[in-house]
Amino acid sequence: MEATTYIAHDDLPNIFAGVGILPVQFGESRRRKLPSEGERKLLFAVLEDAIRCFLRHRDGDAAARTNEEFVEAAQWLSSDEDSGPFTYVSICEALGIDADSLRLGITNHTGRLEEIRC
């Protein structure tokens, strides 16, 4: 019969000897990082463009509401999908914005649309 050897808890640090990574570095690599300034600007631009497209055509006539740009923006803004980096929910999360509150604000928007239509 073969003898089985078990590692004692005191031996655990020796397992990782020579790996070249400190516990602090491991924690940082596993922590979700905030987007850089350039990424934040890109995400904000995508969000802003969708909102502008939606508001630009929302209060128009029936033809404006069937505009491809409006339909695409409306679908994107109402989607709860969060599986990709450029979904509405993912972008709001990355920017620290409550997606549902923003969605409510967009649908209730009664501001100065003349500036948006430009």
Image (tube, grey):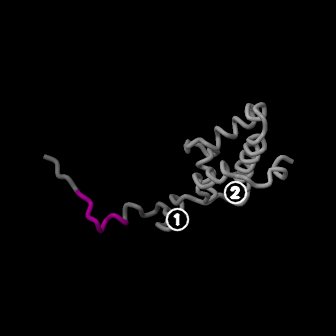
Q: What count of labels does the image hold? A: 2
Q: Is residue 12 magenta?
A: yes
Please, what is the dominant secondary structure of the magenta stretch?
Answer: helix
N-terminal-most mark, 1 or 2: 1
Depth check, front residue: 8 or 38: 38
Residue drawn where x is 59% and y is 48% of the image: 89
Q: Which residue is mark 1?
A: 25
Q: Which residue is mark 2?
A: 40
Segment tinted magenta in the rendering? 6-13
The location of residue 98, given as percent across then percent down, is 58, 56
The local secondary structure at tag 1 comes to helix
The location of residue 11, given as percent across then percent down, is 31, 65
Q: Is residue 14 above or below residue 106?
A: below
The local secondary structure at tag 2 comes to helix
Residue drawn where x is 72% and y is 47% of the image: 51
Q: Is residue 27 left or right of residue 98?
A: left
What crowding class fits label 2: few (fewer than 14 Cα within 10 Å), some (14-19), or many (20 or more)? some
Residue drawn where x is 73% and y is 37% of the image: 70
The location of residue 15, given as percent across then percent down, is 37, 61
- Can you tell which quarter of the image residue 67 is in? top right
The location of residue 8, given as percent across then percent down, is 26, 64
Q: Is residue 105 left or right of residue 111?
A: left
Depth check, front residue: 64 or 31: 64
Q: Residue furthest left?
A: 1
Q: Which mark's residue is nearer the viewer, 1 or 2?
A: 2
Q: Is residue 94 left or right of residue 69?
A: left
In the drawing, what numbered circle is on residue 109?
Answer: none
